């Protein structure tokens, strides 16, 4: 046993008492400080990671303000080009909404262009919109639908880009992950599938008859709505099971969005089964619009709910960081105090023995 401690005894015997205490103190304090440093660094990285997510949520929430009127503009254009003049007064209103939404979006793009690596995406989207608006009167219904849909598809891809550059897609907590998936994937997909069916259905109603081609397109749109609806249900179920504190905020708007989507899909299925046009254009368009509005209303609740959840977790990690620093300082000064008192006591005892 003595051989085990011999190297330590030999080393300490070569040091004077002040140096012995200094050596022991360094052995104690350096690991403590290193562990504390690495812990704080890890907490800081988590805080920075989550703070990076917030600009993405803010940008996506603002981008949605362009997508909704763009989808409605597509539906109105399809109806008007096909002969449905009752919606003409709404076309300029939606165009003005899109123009203003782009202006508002430019402000947030200026703030987060570098953070989110948006580059010239917004400029391209706005340029494509201005080209569409300028040439709309020369388009056929199919061309109008295609040009609108290309722009909207690029906006949905922009959402995925924002989710990637803001770390949203990398979230590890289950409730946050599925809430982000709902915001980035399920809700935009459901609004777009419903929006496409609104444009197709409005065109068919304005023309007054089905063709084999547009019947097939409307059937495919209805099926895609059903798939998007199922995905949304699965995602929301996981979110509410994992975090029941969100039930009061999300349950009712989610149920309302899903209920209106289901009823709207029944209208589409009825049209497809009858293969005849008996639905009033204004009635159909309003029902489709209300359905899409309900889904966007859920979107407008999910975004701040997600942001609030992230803020609470940032606050929690900041609390851990502050607590860690305070505890480390208390322990550090306490040990220094006790260690110094012990050193002075030993030195006093040695001095008295020498006397």
Image: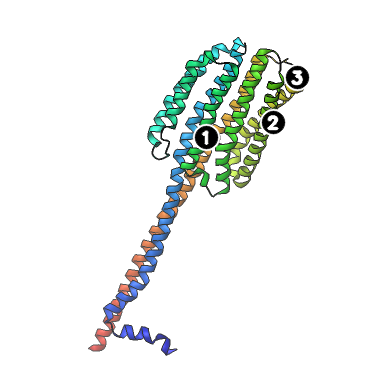
- Mark positioned earlier in the residue sequence (1 or 3): 1
Residue that protrudes farthest toward the right in the picture: 274
In the image, what residue occupies the spot 42% across and 28% down?
123
- Mark positioned earlier in the residue sequence (2 or 1): 1
Q: Which residue is mark 3?
A: 275
Viewer-nearest residue: 208 or 138? 138
Query: Where in the figure is residue 169, as x and y percent of width and height?
Result: 52, 44
Q: Is residue 263 visible?
A: no
Residue 56 position (above or below residue 152)? below
In the image, what residue occupies the spot 52% across and 34% down?
157
Residue 349 position (above or below residue 167)? below
Residue 338, by quadrant, is bottom left
* Neighbourhood count class around disc 1 (C-alpha, 10 Å): few under 14, some 14–19, many 20 upward: some
**Taking 4 as reference, is 268 left or right?**
right
Query: Where in the figure is residue 29, as x and y percent of width and height?
Result: 36, 69
Residue 25, by quadrant, is bottom left
Labelled disc at residue 157: 1
What kind of element bears circle 1? helix
Q: Which residue is mark 2?
A: 223
Query: Where in the figure is residue 7, as x and y percent of width and height?
Result: 37, 85
Query: What is the C-alpha distance between the residues marked 1 and 3?
Result: 34 Å
């Amino acid at each position: 046993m003595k051989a085990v401690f011999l190297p330590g005894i030999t080393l300490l015997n070569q040091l004077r008492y002040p140096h012995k205490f200094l050596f022991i103190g360094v052995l104690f304090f350096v690991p403590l400080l290193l562990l504390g440093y690495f812990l704080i660094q890890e907490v800081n990285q988590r805080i920075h990671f989550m703070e990076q997510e917030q600009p993405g949520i803010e940008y996506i929430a603002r981008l949605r303000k362009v997508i909704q009127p763009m989808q409605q503009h597509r539906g109105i254009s399809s109806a008007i080009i096909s002969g449905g003049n009752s919606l003409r007064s709404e076309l300029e209103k939606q165009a003005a909404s899109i123009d203003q939404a782009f202006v508002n979006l430019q402000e947030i793009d200026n703030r987060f262009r570098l953070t989110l690596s948006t580059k010239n995406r917004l400029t391209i989207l706005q340029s494509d919109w201005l080209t569409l608006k300028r040439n709309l009167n020369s388009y056929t219904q199919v061309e109008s639908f295609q040009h609108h849909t290309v722009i909207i598809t690029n906006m949905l891809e922009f959402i995925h880009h924002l989710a990637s550059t803001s770390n949203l897609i990398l979230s590890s907590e289950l409730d946050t992950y599925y809430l982000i998936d709902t915001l980035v994937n399920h809700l935009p997909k459901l609004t777009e599938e419903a929006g496409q069916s609104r444009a197709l259905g409005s065109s068919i109603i304005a023309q007054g008859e089905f063709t084999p081609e547009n019947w097939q397109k409307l059937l495919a749109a209805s099926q895609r709505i059903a798939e998007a609806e199922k995905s949304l249900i699965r995602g929301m179920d996981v979110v509410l099971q994992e975090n029941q504190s969100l039930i009061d905020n999300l349950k009712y708007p989610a149920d309302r969005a899903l209920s209106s989507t289901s009823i709207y899909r029944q209208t589409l299925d009825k049209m497809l089964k009858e293969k005849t046009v008996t639905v009033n254009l204004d009635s159909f368009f309003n029902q489709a619009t209300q359905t899409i509005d309900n889904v966007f209303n859920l979107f407008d609740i999910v975004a701040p709910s997600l942001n609030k959840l992230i803020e609470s977790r940032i606050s929690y990690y900041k609390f851990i960081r502050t607590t860690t620093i305070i505890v480390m300082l208390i322990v550090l000064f306490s040990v220094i105090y006790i260690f110094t008192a012990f050193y002075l006591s030993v030195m006093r005892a040695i001095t008295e023995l020498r006397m």
